[in-house]
Image (cartoon, coloured by chain):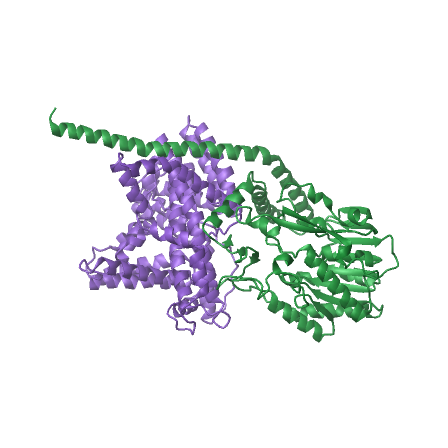
Amino acid sequence: MLFSSLVFLLYFLPLTILVYYLLSFSRTLQNVWLLIMSLVFYAWGEPVYVFLMIASILLNSFAAYRVERAQKQKTKLIILWISVALNLASLFIFKYLGFVAGIISAAGFPVTVPTLTLPIGISFYTFQALSYVVDVYRGDTDAENPFNVGLYIAFFPQLVAGPIIQYRTISDQIRDRKSSVRGVSLGICRFVTGLGRKVLLANAFAAIADHVFTLSAIGSDRYAVPAMLAWLGSIAYSLQIFYDFSAYSDMAIGLGAIFGFRFPENFNYPYIADSISDFWRRWHISLTSWFREYVYIPLGGNRVQNQDYMVRNIFVVWLLTGIWHGANITFIFWGMFYFLVQLAERFFDFPSETTKPWIRHLYSLLIINFAWVIFRADSLYQAGRFFGNMFALNNNGFYSDLCVLLLRENWLQLTLGVLFCMPVGQIAEKYAYDHPEKIRSKVINVLYAPALLFIFALALASLSSGSYNPFIYFNF
Amino acid sequence: MDRSEIENRKKNIEKSNAIEWYMTRKYLFAALFLMLLFCYAGVNISVNAVPIAENLVSSVEYYDRKDREGKNEILYWISLGSALVQKCESAINDNLLFSKDLLWLNGRYARLQGKHEINDFKYFKDSEGYLQYAAFFRDEEKDVFGYAERVRRLKDSVASKGTKVIYVVTPSKYTPGKTVLPSGTPINDPNPVTDELIVNLNRLGIDTLDLRNVGLFDGMRYEDAFFKTDHHWTIPAAFKCAGILNDTLKERFDIDLDPENVTTDKRYYRIERYDDVMFGSMGRGAGLGFTDRESFTVMWPGYDCNFDRRSIRNAAGYEEHKYGPYIESLMHVDVFLSKDVYSDSYYSLYLNGLNYLDHIENLDHPDRPKVLFIRDSYFSPVISFLAPGCGQIDAIWSLEDSDVTDIGQTVMQDTYDLIVIETYPYNINDDAFNYFR
């Protein structure tokens, strides 16, 4: 089930909210209801793999229980490693087995493996499950009953596309949280804003990007993608992935707030970053936090004897980040690309504080854009061809009528897309907050509710009319 | 109280006002949102729950019959679960309250932005306001020579009976030189594939009539030949081409489907234009917010002829029987009664638009030629215009391959004087040649 679907908006969500608040007399029953609805949410798209999720819940509950009760440190460690191995084995079998088998076969040792569909969200909930068991092992939190663990792992707002939440940040909220009118209102506003960004902006960029990348993939003998069009496609994909992913996070955080949960922020205007290091402090914050917490720091982080170890640690994190994103050599390449860039930034101190801001921003945006081309391409060959198209190296020319047409047809979405990459909304809100007496503030206050209602109506209209609504998290 | 204290107090009041305003607008929106969401969801559920549930129950019964055999119990339940979820989701999407208003809103939003395309280039509005099909690339290869071979096999199978066969291609709504498009438009141009098909048919000795090139636009403007909101041609265009087809049949096969020079002469028709009533299939997909209703010209026959028509309307074999004068038997005048432009278009006036099978007997002239039309919806008005000149007509929808219509069997079992195979250029695909594979 998708957040941006009619069945979720008009059937699932109202029912879940209604019954949740009817059960306000019992926190336990509320949690059970949320768990049931989360499993229904997952089973709607994955009727078979919901059992895999239930197995993961039970396995990790049991493992954490045994870890907590084990007397000896060695026993705790063994149970922890078994749990980690089983979690990663499940992830490996469903996500990476085919990829690895392909590599082995290409090396001359033919291997046949069954073709398995990737369970949606397995990367997200496996990492959450791992973080739970590790937190119990470290003593950062106590082992919980399976229902609470199930709710943590399967909670529908953040199941499919994050944010990845460490158990210790949410354990208190599962047991004891307070819903308030304020929290629910803020949550609803955040959810609808996210829905609008996904349906009205991200989907428009997706259409452009998908067409251009497909045209590039069919080969320049059938269609030569001019440089202008290739650049438009890459920029559209950069906008698509930002708006789609951050909108899903907005909706997740909003939905969590409706039920009294406070989830951490996952994006902080990444496209205003002035370096790649800064970008990764703003993009998919929950993932980078997870890797820092459970990989980088345990390896020693920055506090190592010499810089070789630090480089190794950064390399491991980027390798795993690339692998986590998908079972394709392009993702590994993408991770390594960022590894090299980040390393260069560290060692050459570029961009430095003295570099002009516009140069820093332009450099960052170019690197990010190029990286997204690698990320989006089906293969390194296709990525190479796309870069060739961007720089007119494939006898593909520069000017494109189709690019001009697409710009004309999507002028509003592209303008708003670029505008809202910057904290325009935040600035407007702050202005209204700091200057309530000003006319502009009054206008913002008066138009806020009608504008959001209009956005919601437009989103519903778009969804019900069968407009393009891709789901890009099937790789995760 | 000194001045600084007054200033501080003023600032505190302003800040608390700001917080109040900030949260008030959030509370207001949240309250409105919840109210509207629960009302809309509640009404949707109460109106549609029973039809959706019935739909699901019948799906389970259908699935049980069709797919249970050969599956073990677990696999059966897994696949049933997946099928039910998809069915439920489709039923919810198809039974949405105010769906037409939402469609209007979506279309109007696109129009206000000055867009020519809607729903990711599902349709593209050209410079004259005509909705066209768009495509960035062709994602399937068409075995055009294979299609031509099937037609040849059909022709060979009836050759011994003396049956004449002709393949007719209707004009394409996208006509280079007539359709005005902004530069760079990814238009879906079926003409190259159509040209290739004609060449292959001719190479295999099939008589062809390419209505794209035979003077449709002589004395007729493009605007009068095609609808803006529908993929079909207009009735006057269909009428003109019926005349061209008859002239061709006379010339090549000495078959005259208008021996009295009445049915293909527009002087024997009462031509009436109905304004603002036509809203075609493409318009229904894009919505009234994106495009507008247009006029529809009807050619009412000014002569008498009586027919008996039996039609199979759907895959379940539902049969309809009409008989009597032309208007009562061949025309579906109920379209005039419907005020809902989304339910059907006026194009259905002729032979209900499209049936799986139409069997038409000319009660006044049973001795006239017996004709089989293997066709799509483009030929419904043409068949109506030519019906008085035929003794019997069997018209089979070429794109549907079901138990109720078997073109190969029909061709082998019956003897026809003439077989007319017709395809609209956008329909040239594997499904349109469901015979003699």
- Measured from the top left, where is residue A362 in percent x and y? 28, 60
- Measured from the top left, where is residue A202 in percent x and y? 42, 51
User: Residue A16 versus residue B186: which sits nearer the camera?
Assistant: B186
Q: Which chain is purple?
A: A
User: Residue B90 versus residue A232: which sits nearer the camera?
Assistant: A232
User: Residue B388 versus residue A300: which sits nearer the camera?
Assistant: B388
**Which residue is the extreme one toward the left?**
B2
Q: Quadrant of residue B84?
A: top right
Q: State left or right for residue B243 relative to residue A12.
A: right
Q: State left or right for residue A361 relative to residue B263.
A: left
Callout count: 0
Position above or below: B162 against B27: below
What residue is drawn where x is 62% and y is 56%? B231
Q: Is residue A399 visible?
A: yes
Position above or below: A289 against B150: above
Q: Is residue B345 visible?
A: no
Position above or below: B178 against B44: below
- Measured from the top left, where is residue A140 in percent x and y? 29, 41
Q: Quadrant of residue B145?
A: bottom right
**Which residue is the extreme one toward the right?**
B367
User: Residue A473 versus residue B378: which sits nearer the camera?
Assistant: B378
Identify the hue of chain B. Answer: green
Quarter containing the N terminus of chain B:
top left
**Which residue is the extreme one toward the bottom?**
B203
Quarter containing the C terminus of chain B:
bottom right
